[in-house]
Amino acid sequence: MSPLSSLPAASQTQGSWISRTGRVLEEMRRRLRFGNGEWTLGEQQVFLLLAVVIGLFSRLAVVLFRITIEYTRLMLLGSGLVIARWRALLVPSAAGLGVALLVMKLFPRARGSGVNQTKAAVYIYDGFVPFRTVIGKFVTCALAIGSGQSLGPEDPSLQMGAGIASALGRRMRFSRDKVRLIAPVGAAAGLAAAFNAPIAAVLFVIEEVIGKWTAGVLGAIVLSAVSSVVVARWFLGDQSLFRIPIYHLIHPAELFAYAALGVIGGISSLVFVKLVGYARPRLMALPRWTHYFQPALAGLAIGVIGIWFPQVMGAGYQYIDQAMHDQFPWRMLLLLGAFKIMATTLSFVSGTPGGMFAPTLFIGAMIGGAVGGVERHFFPWLTGSVGAYALVGMGTFFAGFLRVPMTSVFMVLEVSGNYSIILPVMISNTIAYLISRQYQRTPLFDLLSRQDGVDLPSMEERREEHALLVEDAMQPCQDPILSSQDSVTDALSRLEGTTGEFFFVDDGRGKWYGITKHMLRQAAAEGKGGVVVGSVLRGPPLPHAHPDHALDVALRRVGDVPFLPVVHRADLTKLEGIVSLEGILKAYREAH
Amino acid sequence: MQVERRCEQCGQLIPWGEQECPMCSENGRFLWSMRRNTLLLLSFLVLIILFVITTFAVKAYRAKERALARQWYVSGERELTAGHAEAALEDFRSALVYSPNDSLVELELAHALAAAGHLPEAHAYLLGLWEREPGDGKVNLELARLAANSGSVPEAVQYYHDAIYGQWNDDPAKHRRRGGLELAEFLLSVGQKAQAQAELIALTADLPSDPARETQVATLLLKTGEYEHAAPLFRQALRLRPNYTPALEGAGEASFEMRNYRDARRYLARAKRAGALSVHSQSLLETATLILESDPLAPRLSGQERAERALRAFTQSTERLSGCAAARGVSFENGPQQSDLQKVNALALALRPKVRERDLARDPDLLLKVTDMVFEIEKVTEHTCGEPQGVDLALLLLSRVQEGGNE
């Protein structure tokens, strides 16, 4: 039966042009001998090719997404930076109502930022991100961000990329493993498209979504991110998101100011996480009918703030740019940072779809700029550009709030294109990260997923897990070690008085064998007492391990052998110790 | 996000919000019947279509951005011209949102910031522009103006120089001249005459034949005391526009300061005929006339005329001496004669019996002696009582001419 015959009539009509297109493509494929004979691509090759396609699709989707946000903003809030009072009050609340209706009725999975949803797709749903979510995310986020909700487009772009990738991967009928890996590939492309920064995007996906470097997926992620950025530059040029101020370290003592920025950034990111973590479950627990009004009320509150501080409405890139160019006095920067924390908390906890990246960068830039401004006020001889503080502040807050230290460093480097800023960035980011980690054990994304009742793997916990090593289960070898050149009789005499049955034989060239007393006695009984032990050995050499090997390596290698020799890396003939299956299991038990 | 039921067919979790298992249900759909490579080709086809759509969307948005940038820029210009700097600020900032790297808008924003009194912000903005284009003439000029306003002389001079020798897209010579003039005016305003002179002299090297420009530079040179360089410039301007009052006044002043009182009177008189004279020029004209009419040693005078002038000058100067002494409380009565006024009075008293018109006309030595006495009295009284007015000033200036001649 044709697959089309089971579809309803409308689908048949729709299917007729699709099937014609399909036939044309089949013919093209046949004539090109593509996929037929020598040009047939294997799954891995298709996977890599698809990564490029995903990158391109994601970028185009993100470009359209950004343009839609901008048009929405122009239509709803006007083109000026100053927003009319009535618009500030009416638009975000009315749009909030519309967004809530869309989310509740049509796109329930569009809620939230998108990062955890992508992680859930990878770890729970075998890489499945419904395409409807991509559409939902596009529509609801464009409306929310364009109407002034204090959220950003990056995390939704990440989810849209993952959704596009998932749809393509499933259509390509990849194996389950590949489909599971394809969502992060799309996520990297989406994020790279949103940031115009491929390295940061790749690192974020590895740091926060996958959690480990695997060659299989790394190539695809890099390919998709790069192809995405190439298209971005085709459309938008190679401009970064912001006009970056030039940075010079005026005096080494200025690094203290950056350390202070790290402390302040760490504390404020902590406040932000605590606010979100406190308010979100409480609002979620309210009766379902209130969820229709929560984004509208958040919008109204943001509108009230927006009357005096229109900068907090929307993603706010233009204000980050202004902060980097020293356009606000430090008190104003401080106020903007504080109000943005409030506005973003309101938007996010109310369930409005939208991302946290742009607000994070905004708050960081404002706090950084304020610290720079204060320093310039009190120590003018020590301060370079206040804009550099805003730039470093972005990374600092990013590191403290999202807890992705590597991404935060590389993001600033990539966005600024200035390697000399690495020192302050590293100092400040590390301090903020450590403060945040000390006082908020669970990182934001893990906190959110746990509030949702889903136990997604915590990448931070995974990174910091103490990996058990062979040395943790290793024991000294008490029994004599035989040489393959010993005679059987000599070997038996050396083993007299030992209680064990299994012994190691060293062939003197770095290979280790196992032999039992029984085998030696049998050889002696057969009149082979004078022959060397090496000639009575059976089977291949034993697998060995090194003390720094992960314990699971030893577990996989130990097999049926009672003991595994643990040898020195520089001298394979030197036995450091032995591990047994029992010892390995004991080490695992003790670790828990 | 909630975890829900498992698919009975494949055992996988059915994502929340999905009616049926997406993996199992999709297998029956049309696209699933296509071969993988056909789908790949289809993807490329869709990609091309999407690419075209995106290109159109981006172009439309770019056009909209350009229009908005223009609209806000024009509005900002209007506000700035109307003196509403704060409103202009927001307009230029809005323009920059749609045209982020437009240096013209950025410069105008810096202008508006400075006009609104946000000097640190304006400075920071210009510094940002400068970091991007350190050789840009406009940016350097704006930075120089800000530095000049804040009284940072070395910084201002540095930026002015960078502006003068920087890059200008249109008519660089004109911009360099303007920069140079502005710098000279700034230097004069902070009392750095020597540096201003150097700048102005450098400017005269490639000055176009424009009476207004030449007069402007020459007038600044006058302010620096560079009369020798100013006078030819005024004359050059007058060759092109003979009745150009500012040039006539300037030429008159330059001639006066170079003690060429005849030329000074000529130029100033022409200026008077050509239009209204400034108070300063009128005063110069009167002084020059008095000098020319009071000088007993002027050439082509009859002996009688010389004697009359010498006698008038002696009378005038001794009156000035008495007035000055009275003003300073110096007595010429008997007693120790120690002050300059007393000493010169004693000399004048000794000479007075010989100062008769007939003797002066006959005896050139006596005439010279009397004239010297007059000049000495004027110098001493100027030293004690300050610069005189009218005929006394004329005689004092004549004494300086004589002094210069003797040197």
Image (spheres, coloured by chain):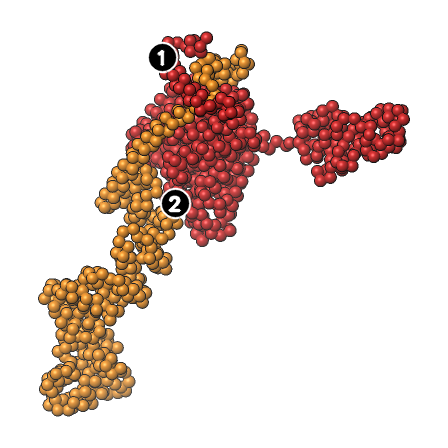
What amino acid is labelled 1 in the image? Thr
Label 1 sits on a secondary structure element that is: helix
Residue at 46%, 13% in the rendered image: B28
Residue at 30%, 48% in the rendered image: B111
**Numbered tag placed on residue A13 in the rendering:** 1
Is A356 left or right of B371, judged from the image as shown? right
Residue, disc 2: A326
Packing grade of label 1 (10 A; few <14, some 14-19, many >=20) is: few
The quarter of the image holding the C terminus of chain B is bottom left
Q: Tell me how many marks there are.
A: 2
Give the quarter of the image for residue B177.
Answer: bottom left
Observer able to see residue B248 = yes
Q: Nearer the viewer, residue A320 or A578?
A: A578
Q: Which chain does red denote in the image?
A: A
Residue at 52%, 42% in the rendered image: A426
Whole-percent x, y for residue B38 in the image: 45, 21
Observer able to see residue A257 = no
Chain where mark 2 sits: A
Packing grade of label 2 (10 A; few <14, some 14-19, many >=20) is: many
Whole-percent x, y for residue A35 in the image: 48, 22
Label 2 sits on a secondary structure element that is: loop
Q: CA distance from mark 1 to mark 2?
A: 60 Å
Q: Is residue A383 above or below residue B383?
A: above
Whole-percent x, y for residue A74 in the image: 31, 31
Q: Is residue A264 above or below residue B177?
A: above
Chain where mark 1 sits: A
